[in-house]
Structures are given as C-alpha cells and as structure tokens.
Image (spheres, rainbow, N blue to C red):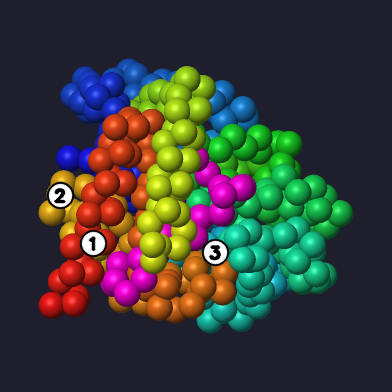
C-alpha cells in the first residue's frame, strides 16, 4: 500500500499508540478526582500541557485541550463572537477555509452577524491589504487558515498579524491544522491570538486537539459542565489521548528538523511529473505552498473515478478535503481561485508525510501515467 492521503489523517506513530495504551491501562483515573490515583492522571495532563506549550513556544496556560480541529475552530470563532457581540458583529474570513470554519460562520450569520469573505488570488493566497479594506469599527475577528488543506497554499499569516496590530481590537484566529509540523509558524511573532491544531494530522490519535488562546484573551465557552480547562472547555479530559498527542507532536517536529528537505524533494518530483503529463493541470502553486500537498486536475475525468482507479493499484489519494470528499460538489477552494467548475470537479489531492519515500513517489507517478492512458482507452471504446 502507498498511502498519500495524509492531509485527511495520518498513521499514528508506534510510540504514540504505546503511550496511549500505557496511560489508558495504568493511569485511568479522573484527573479531577481528589485521590492520589486521580492526582497521577492530573500530573500527566500537566506534563503534556507543558510539553506542547514548549513545542509551540507558548505559555502552558495558553494551551487548551479539545476534541480536535473542528471543536477548536468552533470554540475560537463562536467563543469570540459570543463574548464580544456587544462590541461588534462583523467577522472577516476567506474563501479558502475548512468546513468547520465555513459552517461556523454560516451559523453566526443566522444569529445576525455579518461575514466578509476575502477571495484569494489565482494561486490560492489572500493578501493582508484585502483584509484590511474590509475592517470596520464593528469587526471583532479575522479568521485565516495557515496552510490550505486542498492545494497547500501558505497564507501570509505574519503579514496579516502585523497589519492587525493597527486594529488592536480585532482578534486574529489561525487554523493551523495542516501547517503544524510542516510549515513553521511563530505564534507570538505573527501576533496570533487563537490557533487550532489537531492530533491526527501529525500522527496522533483522532479525538484530540488544541486551541491556543493568547494569555488574557476571553472567550465564551461552548461547553458547560465541570469547568475543566480553566472553565473554557468542560468535560473529563482524555488524558491518554492528550499524552499521546504530546508525544506525536514532539516526534513530528523532530522529523521536520531531520527530514523536511527530503519531503520537499518528493513533493517537487511529483509536482514536476504531473506537469509533464498531458491534460493534467496542477493547481498547487509552485511557490508559497506547503511541502506535502499537490493538487491537480485530469481533463475529462471525474475525480472519484481516478481515485478509485489508483486504489485498485493500492495507491490512496483523495479528492477535496476528507470532510467534503463524499459530496458531489466542486471544490469551493478551487472555485474561489477562479478555476472552472469542470476542472474543480476533477481535482485530486496527493498529501505526503515524513514516512513517504521517493520510491513511492516514482511508483505513484508511473501509475498516474498508466491510469490516464487506460481510462482514455476505456472512454474511446
């Protein structure tokens, strides 16, 4: 099997699974319990928070544990909107965002909030000046993803954060689910107030995530109950998953330091090979794109047909994001970039991890060439 759908989810590291099993079996106490057994679980939770804070280069009290990217995005957006609704009801986002951001915005529209959506350029990148043009005295939040989950374009987060310093009342949220462990981002230097990451995108387990909340920033909680996570996110903490997430993040960042250049080489090879195949259009920009994503369209083919054709050869890629891949609609990201609908409907995504090899990339490229030829022959007959 050649797995090239790592933007949808990644295979958990062996060490991550071992950590999860050990904590689940030996330290299963409730970290809120008064007894010593619960205290051991609480100490593990504190250690994991300190480790993640160190890896993100932030304070430990700015790390809030959630169930994943979707919850973190919803808490950041709705929590800001509800807390600051008396100050204003205008939010700015982009046409590139993940469904968990888009749908949260749609819900807020139903509650009377005004949402401005910034269009990207032809390379799938938004610009700080376009965002600034939309800022009004009513603006309370700007939400921009760091790395686009479909085409891999890198947004100018630092430039946007610098611009927003002139508008100090506007809160800045960044969805960094696809960027973490692949594209470095200093949250303090970029003046980010809220940042989302999700464990299963960096070889952790599904059901765990983090929302970075800048020290001193207040949000309205979405979940009420036992007042865990400093009253921001009630619910008994998934200690085993959180410990495993801390280990996964450490291992991934170590891999980034050791293997990023190899990942870039593999992506460049796939990029160049796809560009040489007739009737294929690569949508991922050559510059300002993440090292692990290549998105392209094959003229005349439906994306799902091509995905299943490669699956028959033991190669796994995807269409749009995993959250939208079973829908027939064209990619909203590509449509926002001005890509024709027929091309947007035929787009597929290759997404790599540090586990992938150049040999796998070579097999994939050859399989694409052979599959295009075979499908063309089937269409003629």
Mark 1 surroundings within 10 Å by alpha-carbon count, few (fewer than 14), some (14 through 19), many (20 or more): few
Q: CA distance from mark 3 to mark 2?
A: 32 Å
Looking at the image, do the residues carrying marks 1 and 3 touch, with CB atoms under 8 Å apart?
Answer: no
Figure check: 26 above or below 155:
above
Query: Which part of the image, by quadrant, shows the N terminus?
Result: top left
Q: Nearer the viewer, mark 3 or mark 2?
A: 2
Q: Position of residue 129 (x, y in %)?
A: 79, 62
* Tag shown at residue 313: 2
Q: Is residue 136 visible?
A: yes
Q: Nearer the viewer, mark 1 or mark 2?
A: 1
Magenta highlight on residue 301? yes
Helix, strand or loop status at disc 2: loop
Residue interval drawn in magenta? 283-303
Residue at (63, 52) in percent of width and height: 155
The residue carrying mark 3 is: 96
Q: CA distance from mark 1 to mark 2?
A: 15 Å
Q: CA distance from mark 1 to mark 3?
A: 33 Å
Magenta highlight on residue 329? no
Q: Position of residue 44 (x, y in %)?
A: 38, 22
Viewer-nearest residue: 298 or 186: 298
Q: Is residue 71 visible?
A: no
The residue carrying mark 1 is: 373
Number of marks present in the image shown? 3
């Amino acid at each position: 099997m050649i797995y090239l759908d790592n933007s949808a989810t990644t295979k958990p590291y062996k060490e991550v699974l071992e950590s999860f099993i050990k904590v689940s079996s030996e330290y299963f106490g409730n970290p809120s319990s008064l007894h010593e057994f619960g205290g051991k679980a609480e100490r593990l939770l504190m250690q994991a928070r300190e480790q993640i804070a160190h890896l993100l280069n932030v304070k430990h009290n700015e790390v809030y544990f959630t169930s994943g990217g979707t919850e973190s995005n919803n808490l950041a957006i709705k929590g800001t909107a509800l807390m600051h609704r008396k100050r204003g009801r205008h939010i700015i986002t982009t046409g590139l965002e993940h469904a968990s951001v888009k749908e949260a915005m749609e819900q807020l529209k139903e509650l009377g909030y005004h949402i401005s959506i910034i269009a990207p350029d032809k390379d799938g990148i938004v610009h700080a000046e376009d965002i600034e043009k939309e800022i009004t005295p009513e603006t309370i939040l700007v939400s921009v993803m760091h790395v686009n989950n479909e085409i891999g374009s890198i947004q100018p987060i630092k430039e946007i954060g610098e611009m927003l310093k002139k508008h100090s009342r506007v809160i800045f949220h960044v969805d960094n689910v696809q960027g973490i462990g692949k594209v470095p981002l200093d949250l303090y230097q970029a003046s980010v107030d809220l940042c989302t990451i999700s464990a299963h995108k960096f070889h952790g387990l599904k059901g765990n995530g983090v929302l970075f909340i800048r020290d001193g920033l207040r949000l309205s909680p979405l979940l009420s109950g036992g007042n865990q996570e400093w009253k921001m996110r009630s619910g008994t903490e998934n200690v085993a998953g959180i410990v495993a997430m801390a280990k996964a993040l450490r291992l991934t960042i170590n891999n980034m330091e050791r293997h990023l250049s190899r990942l870039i080489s593999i992506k460049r090879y796939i990029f160049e090979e796809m560009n040489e195949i007739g009737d294929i259009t690569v949508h991922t920009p050559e510059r300002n794109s993440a090292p692990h994503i290549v998105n392209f369209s094959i003229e005349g083919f439906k994306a799902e047909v091509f995905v299943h054709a490669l699956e028959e050869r033991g190669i796994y890629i995807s269409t749009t994001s995993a959250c939208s891949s079973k829908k027939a609609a064209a990619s909203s990201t590509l449509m926002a970039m001005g890509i024709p609908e027929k091309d947007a409907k035929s787009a597929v995504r290759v997404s790599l991890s540090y586990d992938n090899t150049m040999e796998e990339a070579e097999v994939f490229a050859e399989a694409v060439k052979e599959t295009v030829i075979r499908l063309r022959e089937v269409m003629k007959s």
